[in-house]
Image: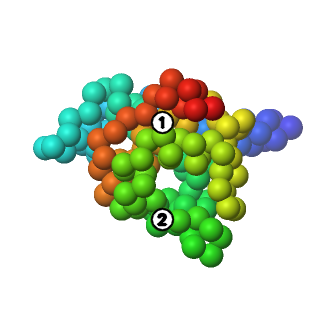
Amino acid sequence: MLRSAIVASVLGMGVMLAGCDGMPGGEPDLNALAEQWNTPAKQWSEADLLRLDRGQKFYKRTCAACHMGTGEGQVSVGAPALKDNAFVSDEVEPLIELVLEGKGTMPGFSHSVTGMELADILTYISNAWGNDSGMTFSMEQVDALR
């Protein structure tokens, strides 16, 4: 009986830690984020580094199955590459509308993510994989088009 309780406790702890994306206490390491995202051309604020981190996590859970973790997409399922994609680096309102409404095989996300979550995801994809737009998206921009 004690052994069952220990096994259940260990398994429960593993599930809890998995939700933290491997970070102790769930707190992102700002120094590591600065090292990952800051460049000589762009120094991100702490708030924006946290937005990029949240956006990356949301992307992995919501978008990566189709667009891949590398942003290379899967044409076979109708998911274009986001990597080095001018549309995600240059187009603010059309990009927000596309993700809210969906297109082709991509569902709309207007009812499944908050305005802040979508702003964070879009901030991430517009700056990941060589996109380097330097753009940030706001909850207000998303909600105005919702």
- Which residue position holds label 1? 120
Q: Give the x, y percent position of residue 11.
A: 71, 43
Q: Position of residue 78 (x, y in %)?
A: 62, 68
- Give the residue furthest to the right: 1
User: Does any portion of residue 141 appear in the rendered image?
Assistant: yes
Q: Please, what secondary structure does the residue beneath circle 2 have?
A: loop
Please name the amino acid that badge 1 sits on: Asp
Residue shown at 57% from the left, 73% from the top: 75
Q: Is residue 30 left or right of residue 145?
A: left
Mark 1, residues whose alpha carbon is within 10 Å: few (<14), some, or many (≥20)?
Answer: many
Vertical arrangement, residue 145 with respect to residue 102, above or below:
above
Depth order, front residue of 90/45: 90
Left or right: residue 84 compared with residue 38: right
Q: x, y percentage for residue 85? A: 40, 60
Could you tell which of marks 1 and 2 lies nearer the N-terminus?
2
Left or right of 108? Residue 74 is left
Q: Position of residue 138 (x, y in %)?
A: 46, 28
Where, by quadrant of the figure, is residue 64 drawn?
A: bottom right
Question: Residue placed at 36% from the left, 25% from the top?
Answer: 47
Which residue type does callout 2 highlight? Answer: Ala
- In the image, taking residue 48 as reference, residue 97 lies left or right, namely right
- Can you see residue 32? no
The residue that appears at 58% across and 64% down in the rendered structure is 79
Q: Which mark is residue 102?
A: none
Crowding at mark 2 (Cα within 10 Å: few <14, some 14-19, many 20+): some
Q: Residue furthest bottom?
A: 76
Using the image as rendered, state which of residue 33 and residue 92 is in the foreground: 92
Measured in 3D between alpha carbons, the distance from the residue under mark 1 to the one under mark 2, in whole angstroms, is 19 Å
- Residue to which mark 2 is pinned: 81
